[in-house]
Image (cartoon, rainbow, N blue to C red):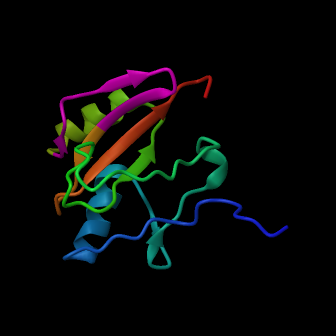
Amino acid sequence: MASITGFGGIFLRADDPKALYQWYERHLGLVKSEGAFGFPAPTQHPQVVFSFFKQDNAYFPPPQKAMINLQVDDLDGVLDRLIEEGVTVDPKRESYDFGKFGWITDPEGNRVELWQPSPTE
């Protein structure tokens, strides 16, 4: 039977896409290729989450229609480096059985979640 095989991408509107690409390249090390960022699938956690939130849920700002969640290998190291680079970093960090989470805000005000999966995940 034909079925979904994986997550294909994230698409966001931006006031200045060129500047936003440059910010993500500079601070998060993403590499743009053929008009978008690509991720080598073998390096990421084997599960990608696709979830819905009620319109008034405060987990991320209600005016923001989508939130990017990026997997990292060292949450504290990434967040500490981003603080040094002047990126807006939420001081809150959370840990659960399935991993650690932190948040940053990009230049256009998008809240971005960073997730370090637990080694057993």
Q: Measuring 20% from the left and 51% from the top, which residue is drawn there? A: 61
Toward which corner of the image does residue 110 lie, by quadrant? bottom left
| Depicted 68 relative to depicted 78: above or below | below
Start-end of magenta stretch: 87-102
50 to the left or right of 64: right
Residue 99 magenta-highlighted? yes
Q: Is residue 36 left or right of residue 111?
A: right
x then y, percent, for residue 18: 27, 76
- Asked if the magenta segment contains residue 33, the reply would be no
Q: Residue furthest right?
A: 1
Residue at horizontal 16 percent and vertical 58 percent from the top: 109
The C terminus - image quarter: top right
Give residue 1's position: percent from left, percent from top.
Answer: 85, 67
| Rendered view: 10 above or below 43 | below
Q: Quadrant of residue 74?
A: top left
The vertical placement of 19 against 107, above or below, is: below
Report the front residue among 42 and 66: 66
Q: Residue at x 42, y 37 (%)?
A: 115
Q: Is residue 41 left or right of residue 114?
A: right
Image coordinates for residue 88, horizontal then vertical, percent: 16, 45
Image label count: 0
Residue 50, given in percent of the width and then of the height, sits at 51, 53
Q: Which residue does the image show at 61% across and 45% down from the upper left? A: 43
Compare residues 17 and 58 and report the one nearer the observer.
58
